[in-house]
Structures are given as structure tokens and as C-alpha cells.
Amino acid sequence: MSRPIHVLRIVLLAVGVLVDAQAAERFALRLIGVRALPAGQAEGGTRVGGFSGIDYDASADRWLAISDDRSEHSPARFYTVKLDYDDKSVRAAEVSGVTVLRQRDGSEYPDRPTAMKRGGDVPDFEALRLDPRDGTVWYTSEGDSRLKLNPFVRRATRDGAFTAELPLPGSCRFSAETKVGPRYNLSLESLTFSPNGDSLWIALEAPLQQDGAVSTQKTGGTTRLTRLGRDGKVLAQYAYGLDAWQLMPAPGREGDNGLSEMLALPDGRLLTLERTGAEVSAGRWAFAARLYEVDLSGATDVKEWAALVGAGEKYQPATKRLIFDFAKAGQTHVDNLEGLAWGRRLVNGHATLVVVSDDNFLPNQETQFWVFEVLSSL
């Protein structure tokens, strides 16, 4: 028996309200402002720069930012940063301290020449997180296939002393086989804790060699997002599709696009930061970046899959939705964005998000802090 038209209208209106409510709760951002550190800044006898990972210490209202300096300019380290902002502007960014990170034996991480002579792990730090349970520091290194140094995730006290190393899956380690494992300088880039701290997510910047080619001007690649237990056990792994390059390099110059950081959302979704670099002239690069909301609910767990090449339609990758395109933010300059962290709440109760750039210690780049208001509930 058909329903009265007015009943159908009520049902459709109710569905419409539900859809609108769900849409309103979708993750959304508003840019508050951008602030860069002064060029050539020093702190504690070290050269400030190379910020590749960042996290927020709510107990002290400060951020910790790790440098990817391979101990070439100063010993491997992270910095304490203060950001002064509200819902209207970002007034100041200030480096207020530095902490040197140390190896298992208590020594500083060596630069390449020192490691060649005396041994040790040359650092290439890319992410830093504070443990939600005890506030200790976790950090990643990309490793160096040329030196036979594998990527790692290590744990340290707040004063930089080594305490533990997380076992990583074999797929994260360099291989003697030329077509298997991570690529040089495109390995372990991202780290985030689940909100309750019972697990961690890691990701490679670019595809494993057995998972296909890196992104190009025309096509994207496929990397993996891996969820680990606190003991290093692989709990799940999902394929993630990377964009093609967002910028074009000058003829004959280099370009890339990769996953530079991710951040866990309370409901199980992830935020991902994809960054493109394009060499526009000798030694000079331009950058673009996008933030995505990633849904894993319909994705295939591929932790048992040795390779994704040739898998065709046998697996379902994670789905992603564009949240923010930095190229369309109306700013004069987007730098090499690599770090992603939550920040303090605003007076209206909204959460904030902070994105930081790696200046590569180059005079034509900046350490930028992009601060956003989170418009959806969090």
C-alpha cells in the first residue's frame, strides 16, 4: 500500500536533516594565520632549522619540534617552541630550548664522516610524538640504505636519553634485493599515536619498491599505512593512494610527491599531509601541500600481502577527502610542510591544528607555522 505524500515528505526531510548534520560534523578547518621563525636563528649553541616533526605538550603549552639535521650543522636534537595565537591571528613563534638526542650508549648521534670511522647511527629524524600515557618522546629516522642503516622508531626521556626501540615489520627495512623494500630517502616519514595510546601508526613517504612506482607528473603511487601495537606487532596495514605531483619542475629538474605526516582522529580516521617539491632552478625548490581526511572503514587489510603490484582490483585502498589545499590559502609562500600536530583549544572550545615546515637549512626557505581552527567537533 502506498504511503501518503505528506508522510514521504516528512521522511525525506528527516533524512535530509540527518545528512546535513553528518556533513556538518565532517572534519573542516579555518586558517588562523602563518608565522615564520627569523632566519639564521640559533638556540643553545645549535643552528635552528630542519623541523620535520612536531607535537604539543599541553601540560606546558609548548610544542616539541624535531630537526632532520643529520648531525651536520649541530648534534641531532629537538627544540621547544612557543606559539602565541588566538582565534584571530598568530602573533609570535619563538624557540625557547633545545634537547640533544642520544644513542643507546649515551653518545650523540654522529654525522656521516664520524660514523664511517667510529660507527653509530647517522640520524635522519622525520617525526616526533609524545606518548599519551607517560609523556615520553618517540621519534623516527628514515635510515640510510647506503650506510646499511635501517629506519627506526625509538623512545627517549624528555632529556633525550635513549630508553627503547620499537620492532618494525620487515617491509620497513632496507633489503639487499634491488626491487624490494623502501627507497632511499623515501622511507619512514610519519608517526602518530591512537588517541588512547594503545597503538601507533607509521607510514612510508613513498611506495615500497614491490608496491609500484613513485608518484610522477601524471600518476600517483601507493604507499602503506601501518598500525602497530606498542610491542611492534603489526595489527593492520592499508594501501594509501598518493597524488601525482602538484607542481611541475623546470625542464630537466627533479620533482616528487609523498606522504610527509599523519595524525590520528578520535573516531579512527586519520589526517594525512601530502607534500610536493619541484625544483624550479638549480638548488631552488617550490612546494605545495594538501591535507586529507582518511577513512579506513572499507579498506582491505594488506598486512599479509608481500606486494601490491599486479594485485589489480583485489584490494580496496583507504579513501581520502581533501580538507585543505595550501596552494589556495591566499598566502604568498608555501614552504616544505612536514610536521602536523594538535594545539591548544581556543576560547570558543574549538581545537587547533599546527603544521610546520622544514627549511632544509637553506637561505631561500623558511620555518613556517600554519595554525588552523578545527571547525568540526573534536
Image: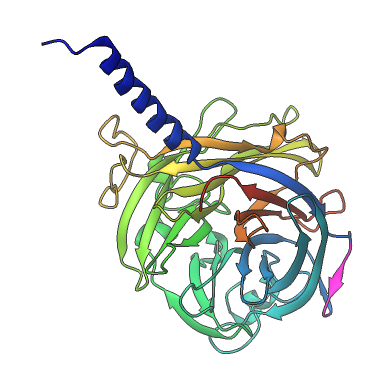
How many numbered circles are shown?
0
Residue 239 horizontal/vertical position (percent): 38, 43
Viewer-nearest residue: 364 or 55? 55
Left/right of residue 26 with respect to residue 92 in the rendered view: left
| Magenta stretch encompasses residue 42 | yes
Viewer-nearest residue: 371 or 359? 371
At 64% from the left and 85% from the top, the residue drawn is: 159
Residue 200 horizontal/vertical position (percent): 42, 64
Q: Which residues are magenta?
A: 40-44
At 58% from the left and 86% from the top, the residue drawn is: 161
Q: Is residue 51 above or below residue 283?
A: below
How is this picture coloured?
rainbow
Farthest-out residue, bottom: 105
Res. 124 visible in picture? no
Left/right of residue 297 with respect to residue 68 in the rendered view: left
Residue 356 horizontal/vertical position (percent): 70, 55
Q: Dividing the picture into quarters, in which one does residue 317 lie?
A: top left
At 86% from the left and 71% from the top, the residue drawn is: 42
User: What secondary structure is the stretch in magenta mostly built from?
Assistant: loop
Res. 144 visible in picture? yes
| Magenta stretch encompasses residue 355 | no
